[in-house]
Amino acid sequence: MSELPSYTPPKVWKWDSSNGGKFANINRPVAGATHEKELPVGDHPFQLYSLATPNGVKVTIMLEELLALGHTEAEYDAYLINIGEGQQFGSDFVAANPNSKIPALVDRSTATPTRVFESGAILMYLAEKFGEFLPEDPSKRAECMSWLFWQMGSAPYLGGGFGHFYAYAPMKIEYCIDRFAMEVKRQLDVLDQNLADRRFLCGDDYNISDIAVYPWYGALVIHNIYDAQEFLDVSSYKNVVRWAREVEERPAVSRGRRVNRTWGPEELRVPERHSATDFK
Ligand SMILES: N[C@@H](CCC(=O)N[C@@H](CS)C(=O)NCC(=O)O)C(=O)O
C-alpha cells in the first residue's frame, strides 16, 4: 500500500467548510433550517418531497406499485428537492424531516397531517397502511424486515463509504477505497448467496425489501453507479444481476425511477409528478 497522507487530529475537531469535497458547500456539522421556505402542497393524499436518488426512488416505486394494484388512495404529488442547492435545509422541509435528507413524505389523509421520514420507515408506513408488500405471517414478516433493515444499515457503506471515496472525494485514498470496496463486495456476496435459490430477497414474493435494496445494489450491478462496474467486478454476482433485471422490468419500477429525476435522457425525466399522465 502507498504511504498514507499523515494527519494528527487536533484535540477538538473544527469544521473546515472548504475541504474540497463534492458536498462541502451543502454539508454542515449542525442540524436545523438555514432559511424560511414554504413547501408546495398538491391535491392528493400523499405529498412527497424528494429527488430520484436511490433513497428517493424507493418511495416512488412503492407508490407506483400501490397505484398499479388499484389503490387510488395512494395518489401522490411529488415535488423536487434539489439537495445540491441546499433545499433540504428550508424550514418546511426540516419540519417534514428534521434530518434534512430526502425523501420526506406527508400523509394528508390522516386527521392531522402525518410526516414520515427515513425511506425504510416510509416503506413500512405505506405497506402497513395499504396491506401490501409486507407479509402478514410473523416468520415471513421477520424475513422481510431483516432484509429491509439490512439495506438501511448496509447502503451507507456503499454510498457514504465506497461511492464517496471512489467517486467524489477530492483525492483517491487507497486505504479508504480498499476498506469500502471490500465491504461492498462482501455485501454483494451476501445478496448473491441469498438469491442463489430465491427469486426475490425473501423467496417467491416481491416485497418492500426488494423495493429498498434494488435502487442501491440493483443499480450498482446493472447501471454502473459510481462508474465502478469493472472495479468491483459486479457481473460476477450473477444472481444479483438476474434479480435486479427482473425487478427493473416491472412497469411500476420504471415509472418510479423517473419521478423527481433531473438528469439522464430528457424523455425519461419527470421532475414533478402529479398524475399518471405525467409519464407520457
Ligand atoms: N437513511 C436515509 C438516508 C437519506 C439520504 O441520505 N438522502 C440523501 C440523498 S440519497 C440526501 O438527502 N442528502 C442530502 C444531504 O446529505 O444534505 C433514508 O434512507 O431516507
Image (spheres, rainbow, N blue to C red):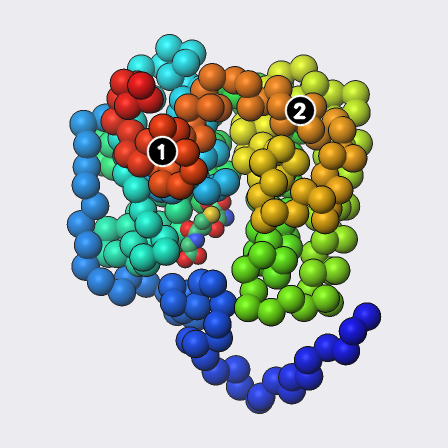
Disc 2 packing (10 Å; few <14; some 14–19; many ≥20): many
Instruction: Evaluate whether residue 45 shows in this view.
Output: no
- Residue 172, image x and y in percent? 64, 66
- Residue 14, image x and y in percent? 48, 82
> At 63% across and 27% down in the image, what residue appears?
244
The answer to whether the residues at label 1 and label 2 have Cβ atoms under 8 Å apart is: no
* Helix, strand or loop status at disc 2: helix
Q: In which quadrant is the N terminus drawn?
A: bottom right
In the drawing, does residue 180 fall left or right of residue 65? right
In the drawing, does residue 130 fall left or right of residue 45? right
Disc number placed over residue 258 in the picture, else none: none
Front in this rendered view, residue 122 or 266: 266
In the drawing, does residue 20 fall left or right of residue 139? left
Disc 1 packing (10 Å; few <14; some 14–19; many ≥20): few
| Residue type at tag 2 | Trp
> At 18% across and 27% down in the image, what residue appears?
43
Mark 1 vs mark 2, foreground winner is: 1
Front in this rendered view, residue 210 or 271: 271
Dot placed on the residue nearer the N-terminal end, 1 or 2: 2
Q: CA distance from mark 1 to mark 2?
A: 27 Å
| Residue type at tag 1 | Glu
Q: Vertically, is 230 above or below 84? A: above
Disc number placed over residue 266 in the picture, else none: 1
Which residue is the site of mark 2?
A: 243
Image quadrant assignment for residue 25: bottom left
